[in-house]
Image: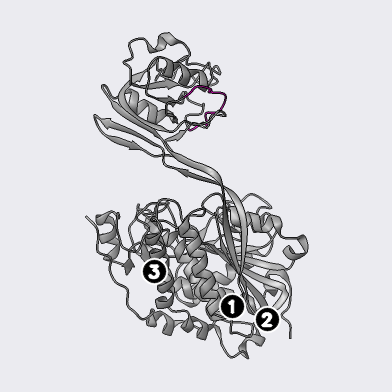
């Protein structure tokens, strides 16, 4: 059953805006025509939601996603460029090539006790040097000399399983079966080719599973010349689940795209401000392949876009450079490409970088990147000097709005990673992804304890129409919050203003971060 999403009011959170206090800014800023309070009034929830709705429409018109390398992303780039041009910018589109992958492989137990295993975490396709044959096969499971016991404490011998290494391991297997073999002793290619020669229609290679040894996923590589059937590698627990189900019927599918494609970053610089002391603010524009990517990261992209539109008219002291990154979901590729190709002299002009990746999670927290490492999760020297001062500004903004906040791990997990790697101070916001909300955070923000901040993280239900959402979970969230599909509009309304406030604060003065005083 498809949920009917609740509608958002047409006027942005007037109560929040009216209650907002004027930020303390440098004396020079106080004389500008537009204060931060006025900036907040210009950045409305209605306008931010208009951008998000446009992204949903783009996804709907382009195969259901906005992933780099696919038409939906190119259309998203066109939309951002059009909006920027209308606001008086001369945007730059930076083209780059990347290794494109779209994994559609599947592993499923059809019966008894049907179960679909998750690609990427419970199994992966083979990547043999001689190619990964695509195909699909369904048949009875045949465990070939599988060993599920875990003998002895570590350390253990390097190889404990000979499963699939000899043709006799497949004695009694009916043609068309799905062979289940186990890692160990001989190479992956030997096992899958033996299974094929014995009449298997597909192969699952499972890990070994001993204590102290790897039980996760391993890429199957090597020379498998002659392989024509689908073959995947499964973690030990997944393989054991198959092996311990008598009479199992299993389906294996290898289906993927892998090639080199073109994608783009988009940049826009304000007309005013010191070009030798640049404030950068960015958000990734691409989605995963499985959906529209409305919270991840339509929310950050849209809030950043509306900030850019409204700030370009202001009398800024420092130039602001906005960035919408491509291929983030493929491994932070757009931001890394930018930094890798940016001359050192230009890197030196960047005062700081602000990142906004997921700012409207349905079961949100207000997370601020932990620039002072008060949580102790970052290694010594990992966080550039000045990042703590960026965190301080975000904390001040939330405090002045009477809003709680949490540290968000400073891990380099999003596009700021490329900047901190070259010593540029960074900060940003994050309302949570697959992690579960704590009881303490429920006391702070409301919502559901033990439930993911974004129950649709990297899933098709990260959309505006509510399609595919878990009805009970989202009904419970909607009882507390204003939701439109997978967007918490209360969190988005507040964070859109926080983003605008932070960008404008540093556009006036970065001296607390890098010691550079604003020009008179």
Residue range in magenta is 217-227
Q: Position of residue 217 (x, y in %)?
A: 48, 33
Q: Is residue 28 left or right of residue 138?
A: right
- Taken as a whole, is the magenta stretch helix, strand or loop? loop
- Whether 226 is among the magenta residues is yes
Q: Is residue 134 left or right of residue 502?
A: left
Q: Residues within 10 Å of mark 2 (few under 14, many from 20)?
A: many
Say which of 122 and 108 sits in front. Answer: 108
Secondary structure beneath dot 3 equals helix
Residue under circle 2? 317
Q: Is residue 257 above or below residue 340?
A: above
Residue under circle 1? 504
Q: Position of residue 339 (x, y in %)?
A: 68, 58
Q: Is residue 365 left or right of residue 428?
A: left
Question: Where, quadrant-wise, is the C terminus in this rendering?
Answer: bottom right
Residue name at image x 46 percent, y 26 percent: 207
Q: Is residue 183 above or below residue 520?
A: above
Residue under circle 3? 53
3 vs 2, front mark: 3
Q: Position of residue 281 (x, y in %)?
A: 59, 68
Q: Residues within 10 Å of mark 3 (few under 14, many from 20)?
A: some
Q: Is residue 406 visible?
A: no
Q: Is residue 497 above or below residue 472?
A: below
Disc 3 to disc 2, C-alpha distance: 33 Å
């Amino acid at each position: 059953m498809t949920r009917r999403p609740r509608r958002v009011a047409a006027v942005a959170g007037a109560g929040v805006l009216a209650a907002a206090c004027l930020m303390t800014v440098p004396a020079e800023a106080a004389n500008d025509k537009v204060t931060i309070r006025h900036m907040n009034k210009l950045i409305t929830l209605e306008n931010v939601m208009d951008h998000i709705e446009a992204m949903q429409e783009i996804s709907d018109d382009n195969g259901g996603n906005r992933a780099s390398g696919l038409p939906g992303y190119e259309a998203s780039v066109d939309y951002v460029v059009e909006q920027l041009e209308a606001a008086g910018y001369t945007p730059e589109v930076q083209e780059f090539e990347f290794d494109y992958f779209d994994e559609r492989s599947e592993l499923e137990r059809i019966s008894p006790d049907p179960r679909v295993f998750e690609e990427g975490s419970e199994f992966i396709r083979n990547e043999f040097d001689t190619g990964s044959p695509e195909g699909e096969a369904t048949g009875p499971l045949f465990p070939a000399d599988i060993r599920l016991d875990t003998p002895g404490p570590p350390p253990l011998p390097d190889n404990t399983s000979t499963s699939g290494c000899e043709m006799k391991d497949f004695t009694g297997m009916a043609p068309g079966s799905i062979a289940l073999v186990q890692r160990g002793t001989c190479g992956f290619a030997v096992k899958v080719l033996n299974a094929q020669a014995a009449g298997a229609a597909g192969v699952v290679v499972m890990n070994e599973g001993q204590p102290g040894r790897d039980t996760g996923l391993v890429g199957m590589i090597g020379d498998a010349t002659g392989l024509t059937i689908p073959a995947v590698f499964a973690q030990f627990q997944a393989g054991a689940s198959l092996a311990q189900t008598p009479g199992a019927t299993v389906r294996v599918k290898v289906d993927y795209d892998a090639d080199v494609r073109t994608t783009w970053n988009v940049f826009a610089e304000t007309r005013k401000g010191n070009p030798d002391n640049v404030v950068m603010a960015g958000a990734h524009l691409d989605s995963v392949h499985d959906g529209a990517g409305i919270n991840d990261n339509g929310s950050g992209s849209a809030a950043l876009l509306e900030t850019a539109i409204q700030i370009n008219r202001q009398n800024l002291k420092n130039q602001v450079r906005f960035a919408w990154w491509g291929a983030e979901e493929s491994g932070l590729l757009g931001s890394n490409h930018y930094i890798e190709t940016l001359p050192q002299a230009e890197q030196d002009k960047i005062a700081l970088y602000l990142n906004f990746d997921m700012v409207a999670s349905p079961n949100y927290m207000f997370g601020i990147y932990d620039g002072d490492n008060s949580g102790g999760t970052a290694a010594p020297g990992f966080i550039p000097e000045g990042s703590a001062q960026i965190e301080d500004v975000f904390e001040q903004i939330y405090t002045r709005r009477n809003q709680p906040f949490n540290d968000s791990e400073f891990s380099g997990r999003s596009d700021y990673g490329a900047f901190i790697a070259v010593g540029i101070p960074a900060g940003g916001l994050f309302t949570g992804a697959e992690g579960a909300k704590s009881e303490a955070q429920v006391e702070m923000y409301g919502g559901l304890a033990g439930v993911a901040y974004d129950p649709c993280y990297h899933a098709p239900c990260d959309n505006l129409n509510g399609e595919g959402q878990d009805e009970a979970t989202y009904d419970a969230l909607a009882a507390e919050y204003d939701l439109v599909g997978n967007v918490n509009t209360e969190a988005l309304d507040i964070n859109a203003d926080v983003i605008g406030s932070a960008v404008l604060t540093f556009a006036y003065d970065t001296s607390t971060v890098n010691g550079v005083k604003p020009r008179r």
